[in-house]
């Protein structure tokens, strides 16, 4: 009942009651009836009418209050799920937060989230609480006890089982003899059913239609969040695989160059030994040792960089800051990060991987080619682009004089920037230091 209707009733009903009562008394009672009888009848009639009207008003208010509490409960659950889900793009974390909030808000005995796998189309249990371990295999695939999940997906509607003991699909998911009401609501995103939310509660506390409706609404709300988390996890895995392939190629190419050089050096040393030129042999051996040591240091640094955690989720600004601090501590090269403070910055996994590798390569070049130099790194982001700048006050070089055979790292950094949809600008001159700036378009940027 609406507020407007209730207001009209509160005016019309008392007025009509008084008019009807006056007509009633004038018809039934004459002037011969004593006044006290008239008063008693009037008092009795008004009391009965007021009591009935009061019961109606307070009953209506109680129902409205109950509806308001239910709406507030829905909003609390929706807000809690939305807030926690927005704090992470990790699929398992999002599913666990949904399960936890459903359990708490609806005082359920068991709950879970199952999603359709893109690989084989099977339902996989992503998160659960209170279900038996045997409900899913080691890969998370639901067995025969799917608690009506497949039926909910096929029909695209919420399925309710009043007593789990009377349904074979539900009975095996819970402890033996448990009398539970099971509800399975489809999870939808972009018009497709991508999974299901499972909920079970004791028969002693049956689920109301409003609670079933709440679970159905929740399935519609969390669908896009879960699908985004699925896509993010998939893109993160692809980014890691591409990065492994790229690094493997870079390490292979670098080692190939070094091994080729060592092969030539061995030939030179062999000829010098045959001619008895021991002083020249010693000089060539020292050069070869130096190259071997430098190659070893570079390979070791590459391994250290690969072991550095890639920011596939979280704040890229913080990850970059921590890497710069670690680089300064490990190498002794002073590097100042000029983007320590600011809003959290979230990038796509592939962009984050490429940016951190560009920074690692640039700072490694400072250490190798500019001994004793200082470095500065800045991070800027707006609604148009994000840019990372690495600058040093080292000896510099002439970019125009660098061919394909030299400065192998510069070519790699340009490839990384282009693969992320951006560009790399290199400015340097002999005696004037070096400045590298990588710019990424706004499509890949999200400032929190």
Image: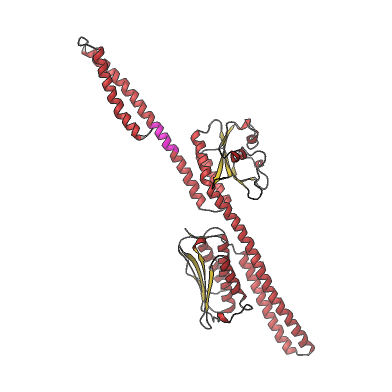
The N terminus: image quadrant? top left
Tell whether position 62 is magenta: yes
Span colored in magenta: 61-70
Q: Nearer the viewer, residue 411 or 32?
A: 411
Tell whether position 311 is magenta: no
Q: Quadrant of residue 406?
A: bottom right
Q: Nearer the viewer, residue 160 or 368?
A: 160
On screen, residue 305 versus residue 26, left or right, reads right
Residue 161 in the image: above or below residue 436? above
Residue 13 in the image: above or below residue 340? above
Q: Residue at x 31, y 31 (%)?
A: 8
Q: Nearer the viewer, residue 385 or 207?
A: 385
Q: Residue at x 30, y 21 (%)?
A: 47
Q: Which percent across, then down, holds residue 328?
A: 55, 71
Q: Residue at x 36, y 29 (%)?
A: 58
Q: Which percent across, then down, holds residue 442?
A: 49, 62
Q: Nearer the viewer, residue 422 or 218?
A: 422
Q: Main secondary structure of the magenta part?
A: helix
Q: Quadrant of residue 53?
A: top left
Please name the colour scheme applied to the rendered image: secondary structure
Residue 219 in the image: above or below residue 442? above
- Which residue extends farthest left? 31
Total numbered labels placed on residues in the image? 0
Q: Which percent across, then down, holds residue 74?
A: 47, 41
Q: Which percent across, then down, holds residue 351?
A: 56, 63
- Which residue extends farthest front? 191
On screen, residue 143 versus residue 41, left or right, reads right
- Which residue extends farthest right? 274
């Amino acid at each position: 009942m609406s507020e407007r209707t209730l207001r009209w009733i509160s005016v019309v009903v008392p007025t009509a009651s008084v008019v009807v009562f006056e007509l009633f008394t004038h018809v039934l009672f004459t002037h011969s009836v004593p006044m006290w009888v008239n008063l008693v009848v009037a008092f009795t009639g008004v009391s009965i009418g007021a009591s009935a009207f009061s019961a109606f008003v307070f009953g209506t208010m109680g129902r409205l209050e109950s509806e308001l509490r239910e709406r507030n409960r829905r909003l609390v659950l929706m807000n809690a799920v939305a807030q926690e889900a927005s704090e992470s793009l990790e699929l398992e974390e999002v599913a666990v937060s949904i399960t936890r909030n459903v359990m708490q808000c609806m005082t359920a005995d068991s709950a879970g989230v199952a999603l359709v796998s893109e690989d084989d189309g099977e339902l996989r249990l992503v998160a659960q609480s209170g279900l038996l371990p045997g409900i899913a295999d080691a890969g998370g695939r639901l067995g025969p006890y799917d608690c009506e999940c497949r039926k909910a997906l096929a029909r695209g509607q919420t399925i309710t089982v009043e007593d789990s003991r009377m349904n074979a699909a539900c009975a095996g998911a819970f402890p033996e003899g448990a009398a539970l009401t099971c509800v399975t609501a489809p999870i939808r995103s972009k018009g497709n059913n991508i999974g299901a939310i499972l909920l079970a509660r004791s028969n002693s506390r049956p689920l109301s239609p409003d609670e079933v409706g709440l679970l159905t609404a929740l399935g519609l709300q969390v669908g896009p969040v879960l699908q985004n988390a699925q896509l993010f996890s998939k893109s993160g895995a692809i980014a890691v695989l591409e990065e492994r392939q790229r690094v493997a190629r870079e390490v292979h190419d670098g080692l190939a160059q070094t091994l080729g050089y060592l092969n030539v050096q061995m030939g030179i040393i062999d000829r010098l030994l045959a001619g008895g030129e021991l002083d020249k042999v010693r000089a060539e051996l020292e050069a070869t040792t130096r190259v071997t040591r430098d190659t070893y240091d570079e390979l070791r640094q590459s391994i250290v960089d690969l072991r550095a955690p890639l920011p596939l989720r979280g704040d890229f600004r913080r990850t970059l800051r921590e890497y710069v601090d670690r680089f300064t501590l490990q190498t002794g090269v002073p590097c100042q990060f000029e983007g320590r403070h600011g809003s959290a910055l979230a990038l796509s996994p592939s962009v984050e991987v490429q940016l951190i590798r560009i920074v690692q390569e640039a700072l490694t070049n400072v250490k190798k080619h500019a001994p004793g130099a200082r470095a500065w790194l800045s991070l800027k982001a707006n609604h148009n682009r994000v840019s990372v700048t690495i600058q040093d006050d080292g000896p510099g070089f002439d970019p125009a004089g660098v061919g394909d055979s030299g400065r192998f790292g510069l070519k790699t950094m340009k490839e990384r920037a282009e693969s992320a949809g951006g560009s790399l600008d290199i400015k340097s001159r002999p005696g004037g230091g070096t400045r590298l700036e990588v710019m990424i378009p706004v499509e890949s940027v999200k400032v929190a």
